[in-house]
Image (tube, rainbow, N blue to C red):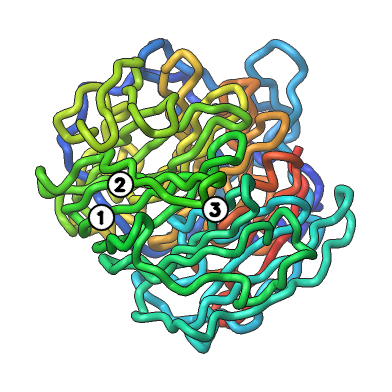
Amino acid sequence: MTLRLIFSLLPVLAPVAWLTGCSDGERPSTPESSTSSGSGGANPGGGGAVATTSEATGAGGGATTGGTTTGGATIGSTTVSSTTTGGGGAEPVAPGIVKLGEGKLAESGLTVVSYGGYLNGESFQQDAIVSFGGFQYTAFWNTNRNVVLARRRLPASAGGAAGAWEKFDFKDYRLSADDAHNTISLGIAPGDGTLHLAFDHHGSNLHYRRSVTGLLTDPEGAAWAASSFGAVSSALVGSTRVSLVTYPRFVTEPGGDRMLLSARIGESGSGDEHLWEYDATTHAWTALGEYIEGTDASMNAYLHGLTYTRGGSRLHAAWCWRDTPDATTNHDLLYVYSDDHGRTWKNNAGATVATTGASFVSLRTEGLSVWPIGQNRGLINQEHMTVDASGRVHVLLSHLPDAEADNSNFTSARTRSEFFHYLRDTDGTWARHGIGLRVVQNFRGKLAISSTENVYAILPDLRIAGASPSDGYATWTLLDAADSGRFFSDPLIDAARLETSDELTVYYPARSSVDIWGLEYTLR
């Protein structure tokens, strides 16, 4: 019986428990050679239900032990379970998700397929959908190859009706290439109410534009129209052109008076990460400089995320290295953090290892690798990282399970790769938990956190799994796969909305369609 048929027989919109037990944890053996694998691959069944691996390593040492599952019946490789006990302590809130509804946020999305996916819906967009001040904002490329901005008023209360999407397009600029790297990212600067866009990059000159002040803080006072934005610019500081740009991402600093922009300068297998900072008081950018060096070693960092602790001021970065333009050379999970908004960086053990613009994080920097993942392991770059309010770092990665042999054919390796949850606890200890679900081609997922600090994996083909802090996130439960088969590319989420509510919006292009859907859920 397939998962889709199983779900058709169960009330999947209510919280359900689809579980298997987890094995006891163990430390990884000596680091694997710096060899890895990258993207692509078909979904060999898409099945499997939950965690089969739980291991720990890092500053705190120790092992992570999975929960206990009882009352389960096995159907194929999936265990349908009725009772779960976690890691003790207070009564946990079991992960659960309820789908509230869905609607089209676009009916004219560009459907060019590049690098296996659409230009709308790529994991390295940070962010393509974001909420602020009671409105939700999103962007996409339309079939005319123009950037479209859309906004809607969010419900006043949980489960209420949202407003209709208001849209306009920038007709003064057209997409330069059918290249899935050339996505659109949005930035929010609360201090002056400006909305920022960076778009159409793959080793390109910067394409950047900014709204008038107050567009976000006084949404009725400025026109929701292209006329409320400046012209496309290739400069941030003065007239100095920013060149060789790929993967721009905005990060709003705590307090909202400043905002960071990070981008790769260079190319695949040979690039550096740079930071700029926007000051909402002066309405001006400052170049902070390079913070991750790659070109000297003919390699580059692929960020899984650059984000602050939820409700906190610590900035975290996680990435993999790539040694050549070939995705098979992706390797390792690397991590640093900053307590001064990206000026200086510390490794996992807390030692200062770099100063932005002066001394850089590089291949030679000690204490960066927190989990060895070799080349030829089907490791895909730029999956996802998020940080909960307790300061635990959660990283979603997909690669071959340990039992699988190395595979230098990336596409082939992806056909047998699975999703894993990597966790940095507050003492610096890292653990790994298998989610037990296969990848779908070269597509990547996202992690969402509820107010209870349950963590949800929003996976390609719209499979949603969850785990609880009660057992250290060792037991992953498949909660919803009812919409499997409908969508294409990477699911994106509104992480900012989750900062203030348990309402999850998933942005997902329909398969073989110009429609982009917004799917609404409540998390527990």
Of the residues shown, which amino acid type is indicated by label 3? Leu
Contact, CB < 8 Å: mark 2 with mark 1?
yes
Could you give the CA–CA distance between mark 3 and mark 1, rounded to whole angstroms?
29 Å
Of residues 343 and 237, the one nearer the viewer is 237
Q: Residue at x 41, y 78 (%)?
A: 113
Of residues 463 and 298, the one nearer the viewer is 298
Tell me if residue 74 can be seen. no
Say which label, 3 or 2, has the lower sequence index: 2
Q: Judge the density around disc 1: few (<14), some (14-19), many (≥20) Cα neighbours within 10 Å.
A: many
Q: Kindly identify which residue carries mark 1.
A: 265
- Residue 362: image location, x then y, percent: 19, 35
- Residue 448: image location, x then y, percent: 61, 43
- Kindly report which numbered mark, 3 or 2, lies closer to the viewer in this rendering: 2
Whether 258 is drawn above or below 415: the answer is above
Q: Residue at x 44, y 32 (%)?
A: 341
**In the picture, residue 325 is in which quadrant?**
bottom left
Of the 4 image quadrants, the one containing the C terminus is top right
Of residues 397 and 10, the one nearer the viewer is 397
Residue 274, numbered label? 2
**In the picture, residue 498 is in which quadrant?**
top right
Whether 74 is drawn above or below 206: the answer is above
